[in-house]
Amino acid sequence: METQRLIIREVREEDFPALLSIYTQPETMKYISSGKYDWTMEELRAKYDRINTHYAQGFGIFAVQLADQSTVIGEAGLFNSFDNPAILELGYILDRNYWHQGYGKEICQELIRYCKEELETEKVVARMYAENEASVRLSEATGMTRIETGTTPQGKTFYTYEIVFRQ
C-alpha cells in the first residue's frame, strides 16, 4: 500500500531495530492496550510471528516507511480480532518523532481504503483509550463513528469506533 508520503508493506528482518526503538518509547506505548514499553527483540519477533500468519489473507502488522527514504517510522495493523475476516480491527503505532505531521491520518485512510476496495471487508473497527485524544480525533476525521464507550478491568475508559462498508 502506498500514500503520497508513505509505503505500508510487510515487515522485513531489517525493520526490527527501528520497530524495537519505537516499542521501547514509554510515551509512544502509553496508549497501547498492554502499556508495555520494555520489549526485547525476542518478544517483538515473537509478536510479529504470531500475528503475521495472516499475511496471505491480506492482513497483519505492516511496517510504515517514508516513501522518499527507507526510514521505518511505525507500524500499521489490520487484525482479525473478531474471528471474522470480514470485520478487521485497525491499529497503528508511530515513532513519537513523527507525531502531529499527518502520518496517522494517511495510514488510517489508506488502511480503510485497502479494507474496502481490496479486501472487501464489511467494516473496520478501531478501539482506543478515551484519553488518547489524537486517535479519537483521527477516527472521527476518517469517517468512523463511535459505537461504544466502555471501561477496562483496570478502570480506564475506552471507545470503539467503526466504519461500515456493507452488511
Image: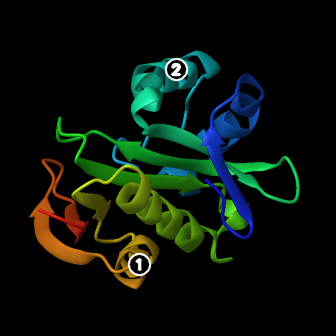
Q: Tell which of 58 and 93 is nearer to you.
A: 58
Could you tell me which quadrant the C terminus lies in? bottom left
Residue displayed at 58% across by 47% down: 75
Judge from the rendering whether residue 115 lies leftward or rightward of residue 147; answer left or right: right
| Front in this rendered view, residue 108 or 129 | 108
- Relative placement, left or right, of 11 versus 14 is left
- Counting from the top left corner in percent of width and height, residue 32 is at 41, 50
Instruction: Pick the residue in front: 161 or 166.
Output: 166
First in sequence: mark 2 vs mark 1: 2
The kind of residue tagged 2 is Glu
**Amino acid under label 1?**
Thr
Is 127 situated left or right of 4 in this image?
Answer: left
* Residue assigned mark 1: 142
Can the viewer see residue 24? no
Could you tell me how far apart the alpha carbons at marks 2 and 1 are, in whole angstroms?
32 Å
**Above or below for 68 versus 142:** above
| Disc 1 element | loop
Residue located 12% across and 47% down the image: 153
From where the camera sits, is residue 98 visible? Answer: yes
**Residue 98 placed where, x, y %?**
70, 65
Q: Quadrant of residue 60?
A: top left
Q: Secondary structure at mark 2?
A: helix
From the image, tell me which residue sits under label 2.
43
